[in-house]
Amino acid sequence: METIHLTYPLKIQSEVPPVSLAIGYFDGVHLGHQSVIGQARQMAEELGTSPAVMTFHPHPREVLGKASVSRYLTPLSEKLLRFAELGVQRVYVMKFDRELASKTQEEFVEEVLIPLRVRGVTVGFNFTFGRGAEGKAEDLNRLSDGRFQVEIVHPIASDGDFVSSTRLRQTLDSGDVEAALKILGRPYSLRGEVVQGNRRGRTIGFPTANIQLQDPFIIPATGVYVVRVHREGVSKDLFGMMNIGYRPTFRDPDPVKTLEVHLFDLDENLYGDRLEVEFLHRIRGEQPFASVTALTEQLKSDEENSRGWLKRQNLY
Ligand SMILES: Cc1cc2nc3c(=O)[nH]c(=O)nc-3n(C[C@H](O)[C@H](O)[C@H](O)COP(=O)(O)O)c2cc1C
Ligand SMILES: Nc1ncnc2c1ncn2[C@@H]1O[C@H](COP(=O)(O)OP(=O)(O)O)[C@@H](O)[C@H]1O
């Protein structure tokens, strides 16, 4: 997959291949987004073009001062990985700035889509473009003037409700990672590097790899989760239990939120490794314990519960 960063006005140096383009911000790359991208792939096949995606960076709402970056689900690096998994061959990362935001819908079509040799466009039903979000998905048909085909993708439902980035964020904020899975079509995951902690874990029989996030991922609610872990460069799936929280048992005067995972049936040095952690199931909330012994007893029962759950799911 080729990734091309663009700014407006476009400076296209070499001849670009004709594309069928899925356009959107695609925060979360959830089932709705996957359906828009799938539609672009199908169109690409029909039209004999490359399946491509155009996404914007940074988020339009952020540039226009309506929201902060920390509320976004998928860092750009993560989105690119997901696009590649979905069979996209070309990604245009369009820099979203005030200049682009000030362009009319006509200018967006004539000065961005046409020079990029767009033969097909797919967008979600609620796509808007052009200054003040004046252009709606249906306007693309009129503006294409027969030069490219347009497909507007209907909303996808899961659990009786339309999937959306907002719903996905809510499920993560409440720790309902199983609902998140139904919106994403895959478990919610984040990536980070294993760093040193306080080295207490190994003394209580539960070494825990502390994860430092690579990008500003959204962190699910504090609590304990059953997770599947991929170690970069290692194909075998690992399983374990992760705690997200402040470790209140240790009454640290200045607690910081940590993400730490104890992996089952593994005894290896992981410092410096990059891990992808997938959230499968929530076991409980984080709580303070009267003693380290009481915490250790709880961890034993968490392990039993986690293994039991994994077994029932035929995962481990
Ligand atoms: C599955 C799991 C659940 C945990 N639950 C709690 C908890 O409820 N309360 C708490 O204070 N600490 C909890 N911890 C955090 C432990 O206190 C922590 O692993 C220990 O302090 C080791 O920290 P270290 O890696 O910095 O040495 C949990 C850790 C794991 C792996
Ligand atoms: N099964 C395991 N799960 C997690 N980490 C493990 C495991 N076995 C060995 N380790 C290593 O032990 C470290 C965690 O031990 P711990 O005493 O909790 O130290 P720290 O406080 O530095 O995280 C991990 O970073 C990893 O390098």
Image: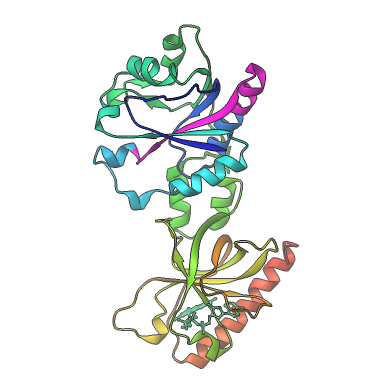
Relative to residue 131, is residue 156 depicted above or below? below
Q: Is residue 6 magenta?
A: no
Q: Please state the horizontal and vertical placement of residue 83, each as a whole percent of the image.
A: 55, 40
At a point 68% along the width and 63% down the height, the residue shown is: 237
Q: Please state the horizontal and vertical placement of residue 20, each as a whole percent of the image.
A: 56, 23
Q: How is the image coloured?
A: rainbow
Relative to residue 221, is residue 66 depicted above or below? above
Q: Quadrant of residue 25?
A: top left
Quadrant for the N terminus in the image:
top right
At a point 47% along the width and 86% down the height, the residue shown is: 199
Q: Please state the horizontal and vertical placement of residue 135, each as a whole percent of the image.
A: 36, 20
How many numbered marks, from 0 up?
0
At a point 56% along the width and 46% down the height, the residue shown is: 184
**Seen from this angle, which residue lies furthest top?**
145
Q: Which residues are magenta?
A: 39-59
Relative to residue 21, is residue 176 depicted above or below? below
